[in-house]
Amino acid sequence: MGSGLLDLEKHFSFYGAYHSNKVNIWIHVVFVWPIVFTAMMWLAYTKPLAPQLPVMASLPFHEFMVLNYTFVFAAVYALFYISLDPRAGSLAAFLVLACWVGANAAAQSLPFVSGRNLILVTQGVCWTSQFIGHGVFEKRAPALLDNIVQAFLMAPFFVLLEVLQSTFHYEPYPGFSKSVESKVNESIAKFRASKKKKNLAD
């Protein structure tokens, strides 16, 4: 178990309180990672911050391992996820680094205008779908309206853990799911009570 910034249970409980509806969860599973990829693709059009390390030259797809802002983005997310949970975090880190390579490959193959249009359409569809998920199914505003940094950092890892839990019954440590469920239910109950009180006041 971590503490403070590395408290996975706290992060997961916070995010889970805004994503308890199954339809909304799966909307996020489908659309969160394309947002991450296209955001990194946008950064992939920037110039390298440093020359490629010699050791990279022998790696597959080394021509797409550009040390630009996309790499900075990927490195921060990868290290954060591994720090939260070494096992699932390593898988998340691999996915983020794969997005780094893929985003550079896409940026190198598409002219900026074409890439920009693809990014804008993808971001528009993905964000609209998630807002629909919150408005129609969750009936609660997205987590980013309350804590934008935590929401953006946790969203990709949250949906990955959801898939691992639902498919393989994965837990970062024994009792994690039960503890998170209890905290999520408590948070949702407080939200509904506050909403009911506000409606009565109106």
Image (cartoon, rainbow, N blue to C red):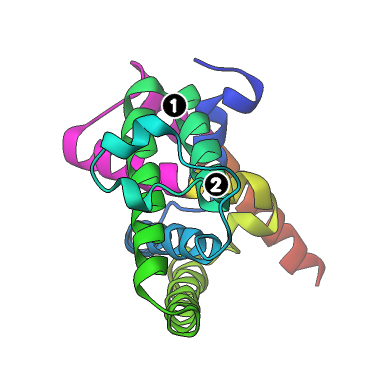
What is the three-letter code of the residue carrying label 2? Answer: Phe
Q: Is residue 11 above or below residue 201?
A: above
Crowdedness near tag 2: few (<14), some (14–19) or many (≥20) residues, C-alpha within 10 Å: some
Query: Which residue is painted at 53% across and 31% down in the image?
Result: 80
Which secondary structure, mark 2? helix
Residue 154 left/right relative to 144: left
Majority secondary structure of magenta residues: helix
The residue lying at 27 percent from left, 48 percent from top is 61
Distance in Å between CA atoms under marks 1 and 2: 15 Å
State yes or no: residue 92 in magenta: no
Residue 60, by quadrant, is top left
Percent position of residue 76, x then y: 55, 37
Foreground of the two, 33 or 117: 117
Specify the farthest residue to the right: 201
For label 1, the residue is 82
Q: Which mark is residue 73?
A: 2
Numbered circle sitting on residue 40: none
Q: Residue furthest left?
A: 168
* Left or right, 202 with reference to 129: right
Q: Position of residue 115 (x, y in %)?
A: 44, 77
Magenta-colored span: 156-183
Q: How many marks?
A: 2
Q: Tell me the kind of residue under disc 1.
A: Ile
Quadrant housing the C terminus: bottom right
Q: Nearer the viewer, mark 1 or mark 2?
A: 2
Q: Is residue 168 magenta?
A: yes
Q: Residue at x 34, y 57 (%)?
A: 102
Pick whichever of labels 1 and 2 is earlier in the sequence: 2
x, y percentage for residue 44?
50, 60
- SS of the residue under disc 1: helix
Residue at point 36% right, 17% down?
173
